Image: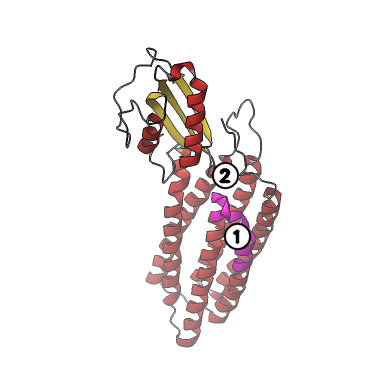
């Protein structure tokens, strides 16, 4: 049985330091953008500021969750605290979707009732925002490779950078042609991107929290491969899930044939090796059943390449 905690490496404190710095930078940027948006009358600038504030909050939540996730398992949390980061990701993506809906609502109101905009203020502050967005993205890039939270924060800042470019574009058109309608249209575009991003990312967090089988792993194929292993007569009550982003777990009942019943440890070893090498399952719990003592189970699914396995379930 493998207990792989490699996801919480010695690089975690450095990543947390970058997150803390990114939070401070984004909070400062939010204040500047809100003031600039109010003074200039630009809804797009205020929209970008709200998005930056959500990023600051997202980074703060990710920072706190990452620290909690490093805590070892204890008597009350026997699986450990790794899912704190997944819970944080769900909170962040849900908030992002709510924010996108709010921005769309405000943009529609501004389309119906256009307001004057000070173009130069918009362009200058959006340019500052673009620089800070790129700095924040740089701070979070390294940690984005192994954390759903930080990856989301990194992608949010890339989206912010694109939003800042769009705001600069809108402000320039206001300066050159007095096209104030461009401002709410750009806000709608930012809202659409925020909604798309939040909608596509939230599913991954929900699947982990719902103990779904990992993407790209066919539970029927896993059950079939186990059934085809030497010494295995039947496999049932198969459960395949992810504890967090990095660790896949499996538990199952394995009925042994008459020959293997004398050496159950050898069958378990073969199964663990196969599951790790072929499917990347690092934590395996197997209950072996000797001939004549298999538990009663309803007829189940047909594993790929093998005979039926009773009660196969992908939780």
Which is nearer the eye, 117 or 3?
3
**Above or below, comparing residue 76 to residue 150 in the picture:** above
Q: Which residue is mark 1?
A: 141
Residue 100, image x, y percentages: 45, 59
Quarter residue 142 falls in = bottom right
Image position, residue 150 (x, y; %)? 58, 53
Q: CA distance from mark 2 to mark 1?
A: 17 Å
Was residue 144 drawn as part of the magenta stretch in this picture? yes
Q: Which image quadrant: the C terminus? A: top left
As drawn, the label of residue 281 is none
Q: Residues within 10 Å of mark 1 (few under 14, many from 20)?
A: some
- Name above or below for residue 23 compared with residue 165: above
In the rendered structure, does residue 205 fall within the stretch colored magenta? no
Q: Is residue 201 visible?
A: yes
Asked whether 48 or 21 is in front, the reply is 21
Q: Residue at the far bottom: name it.
A: 176
Q: Horizontally, is 219 left or right of 131 in the view? A: left
Where is mark 2, residue-wise?
Answer: 85
* Horizontal and vertical percent position of residue 160: 53, 65
Q: Is residue 155 above or below residue 117?
A: above
Q: Which residues are magenta?
A: 133-151
Q: x and y percent of residue 147 in the render?
A: 57, 50
């Amino acid at each position: 049985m493998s207990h792989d905690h490699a996801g919480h490496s010695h690089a975690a404190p450095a990543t947390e330091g970058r997150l803390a710095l990114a939070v401070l930078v984004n909070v400062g940027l939010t204040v500047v953008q809100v003031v600039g948006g109010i003074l200039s009358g630009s809804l797009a600038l205020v929209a970008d500021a709200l998005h930056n504030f959500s990023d600051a909050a997202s980074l703060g939540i990710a920072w706190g969750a990452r620290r909690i996730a490093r805590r070892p398992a204890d008597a009350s949390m026997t699986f450990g605290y790794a899912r704190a980061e997944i819970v944080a990701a769900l909170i962040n993506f849900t908030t992002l979707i709510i924010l996108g809906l709010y921005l769309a609502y405000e943009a529609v109101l501004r389309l119906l009732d256009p307001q004057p905009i000070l173009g130069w203020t918009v362009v200058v502050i959006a340019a500052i925002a673009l620089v800070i967005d790129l700095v924040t993205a740089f701070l979070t890039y390294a940690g984005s490779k192994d954390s759903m939270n930080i990856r989301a924060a990194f992608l949010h800042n890339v989206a912010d950078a694109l939003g800042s470019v769009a705001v600069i574009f809108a402000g320039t058109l206001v300066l050159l042609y007095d096209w104030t309608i461009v401002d709410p249209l750009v806000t709608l575009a930012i809202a659409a991107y925020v909604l798309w991003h939040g909608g596509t990312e939230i599913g991954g967090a929900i699947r982990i929290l719902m103990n779904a089988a990992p993407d790209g792993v066919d539970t029927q194929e896993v059950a079939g491969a186990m059934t085809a292993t030497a010494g295995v007569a039947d496999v049932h009550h198969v459960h395949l899930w992810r504890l967090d982003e990095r660790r896949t777990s499996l538990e199952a009942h394995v009925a042994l044939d008459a020959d293997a019943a004398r050496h159950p440890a050898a069958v378990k070893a073969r199964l663990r090796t196969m599951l790790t090498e072929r499917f990347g399952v690092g934590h395996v719990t197997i209950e072996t059943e000797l001939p004549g003592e298999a538990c009663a189970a309803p007829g189940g699914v047909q594993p790929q390449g093998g005979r039926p396995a009773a009660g196969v379930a992908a939780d």
